Image (spheres, rainbow, N blue to C red):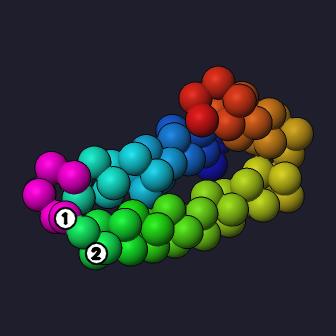
Amino acid sequence: MTPAQLGVLYKTWQHNFKYGIQKFMTKTGAKGPQRYFFNAIARSLGGIPLGAMERYARHKSKEHEKVIETIKTKYW
């Protein structure tokens, strides 16, 4: 996997788990504690694949790691 491909994959997961699910829950009209509970689960479980991609980037090369760090600083 090239650094660019890893960057696209990372940003997609980041958007889907960190923002997309939360937005979906607010748009569906879920109210009360279930909305907050679901958002907390989405945020915490979303970190698992992101952390795995960060570890992969550190293991693969400095260029891969630089792409992930750029995404984290510019688009987080």
Q: Residue at x 64, y 41 (%)?
A: 2
Residue 65 falls left or right of residue 74: right
Q: Please report the bounds of the magenta region as a residue range.
A: 26-31
Look at mark 2 in the image and give the residue it sits on. Answer: 34
Q: Quadrant of residue 53?
A: bottom right
The front one of 30 and 32 is: 32
From mark 1 to mark 2, how far is it between C-alphas?
7 Å
Q: Residue at x 59, y 63 (%)?
A: 47
Q: Residue at x 45, y 73 (%)?
A: 41
Q: Secondary structure at mark 2?
A: helix
Q: Quadrant of residue 76?
A: top right
Can the viewer see residue 19 in this picture? Answer: yes
Look at mark 1 in the image and give the residue it sits on. Answer: 31
Amino acid tagged 2: Gln
Q: Residue furthest top?
A: 74
The front one of 22 and 45 is: 22
Q: Are marks 1 and 2 in contact (CB under 8 Å)?
A: yes
Amino acid tagged 1: Lys
Q: Residue furthest left?
A: 29
Q: Is residue 17 magenta?
A: no
